[in-house]
Amino acid sequence: MGHSLILRTLSCDDILSHIFALSDVLINCVEGGASVSFMSPLSRDSAIAFWQRTASSVAASERIVLVAENEQHKIVGTVQLITDQPENQPHRADVAKLLVHEAARRDGVGRALMMQLENIAREAGKNVLVLDTATGSGAETFYQHNGWQKAGEIPRYALLPGGELTATSVFYKLL
């Protein structure tokens, strides 16, 4: 990693006070083709509404939001750990919305976020993590290079931001 990063979890209030910066990262990723549940073009209002819902989920202790800030304290990446799981799965969590602004890519931000998220998951008593990502994407390769195991693919799972159908690859990691 070429630059120092500050990694920290955000409270509900933190998310709301950084909602424009978080929205900028989300919009940048969607406009760059990331398959993260949104279509292109993603409006600022839709991005803000997403982060407002996320803040409410954090307030309800359903998820943890982690951010990476650069030396200028600008948010350059984020990832979420969804800890609210069914009663028979208290040991499991879902990983969602790993987002790294294109200006900060290939500098270790995603890897740093994921390593810290795994530490947070362990501290929360989670030992099985699950995620999915578009098959054939750079994210799929990233997860494989970071110790995630591919469990399989589901064809025609979602639309890419530009409207094309894509399969999703389901991954897990045992902690």
Image (spheres, rainbow, N blue to C red):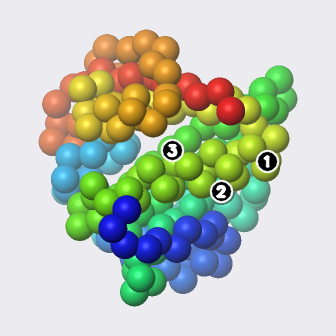
Q: Is residue 150 above or below residue 59?
A: above
Label 2: element kind: strand
Of badges 1 and 3, nearer the viewer stands 1
Of badges 2 and 1, nearer the viewer stands 1
Mark toward the start of the polypeptide (2 vs 1): 2
x and y, in percent, of residue 90 in the image: 81, 33
Residue 15 versus residue 131: which sits nearer the camera? 131
Hey, what amino acid is under mark 3? Answer: Ala
Mark toward the start of the polypeptide (2 vs 3): 2
Residue 70 versus residue 34: which sits nearer the camera? 70
Hey, what amino acid is under mark 1? Answer: Ala
| Visible residue check, residue 23 | no
Classed neighbour count for the residue bearing mark 2: other residues with Cα under 10 Å, few (<14), some (14–19), many (≥20): many
Residue 106's label in the rendered image is none
Label 1: element kind: loop
x and y, in percent, of residue 58 in the image: 67, 61
Label 3: element kind: strand
Check if mark 2's residue and mark 1's residue have beta carbons within 8 Å: yes
x and y, in percent, of residue 55 in the image: 61, 65
- Residue name at image x 81 percent, y 41 percent: 125
User: Which residue in the structure is indicated by mark 3?
Assistant: 96
User: Which residue in the structure is indicated by mark 1?
Assistant: 124
Q: Is residue 17 above or below residue 9?
A: below
